[in-house]
Amino acid sequence: MTTPTAGWDSAYEAASRPPWDIGRPQPAFVGLADGGLLSGRVLDAGCGSGEHALLAAARGADAMGVDISPRAIERARRKADERGLTVRFEVADVLSLGELGLAFDTVIDSGLFHVFDDADRARYVTSLASVLPSGGTCYLMCFSDRQPGTLGPRRVRQEELRTAFGDGWAVTAIVADAFEVNPGLGTPSAQAWLATIRRV
């Protein structure tokens, strides 16, 4: 693994819940599931405590979640057991997904892309390509440049998404959406982009 685990792991200490871990799937991904779009072999990249992989599994997908944080994966496995769902959760670096030796029909990214600097952003896109064959789809939700202020992660412009996924991908849609966030940040939601990106 190349990404430091300590910072992310501390976000999942027993008594804490990070801002992005709302204890349920983001509504945007529930909408995708309702439309039958989280099916087949689904990978939740940077799955945190697993809500989106669990959502996909509950809708019949062969789901897997990976995260750099062992604590997050422990929580995700516990949720799967409690809910009686079969989901594979593994500690893994999303910048090296090819090491999984697996391929998926769909990749979910809820709030991961926007944590990377430019160099790691490029590595991440290459990593996604290693597990998503031609015809596969990535549903990516990230902080939007429409979000005011500076609190929270890096804002992303639509053109940055199109540039990052410019080679070997087709960005078929980018729509305005919002992340629900935990109370205490002074706002119940944060502006986001939800992108549909296909491998070509």
Image (cartoon, helix red, strand yellow):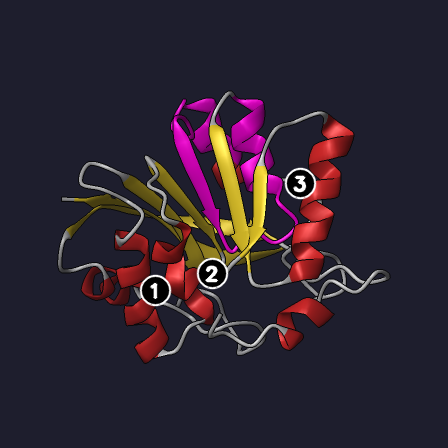
Q: Which mark is residue 115?
A: none
Q: The residue tagged with tag 3: helix, strand or loop?
A: loop
| Residue at image point 63% right, 69% down | 8
> With 153 as the anchor, is 86 left or right in this view?
right
Q: The residue tagged with tag 2: helix, strand or loop?
A: loop
Q: Which mark is residue 24?
A: 3
Q: Residue at label 2?
A: 112
Dot 3: few (<14), some (14–19), or many (≥20) neighbours within 10 Å?
Answer: some
* Residue farthest to the right, as pictured: 15
Mark 2 vs 3, N-terminal side: 3
Mark 1 vs 3, N-terminal side: 3
| Residue at image point 40% right, 32% down | 41
Q: Which mark is residue 124?
A: 1
Instruction: Give above or below for 37 relative to 189.
Output: above
**Can residue 2 be seen from the camera position used here?**
yes
Distance of label 2 from label 3 (alpha carbons): 17 Å
* Amino acid type, residue under disc 2 in the picture: Leu
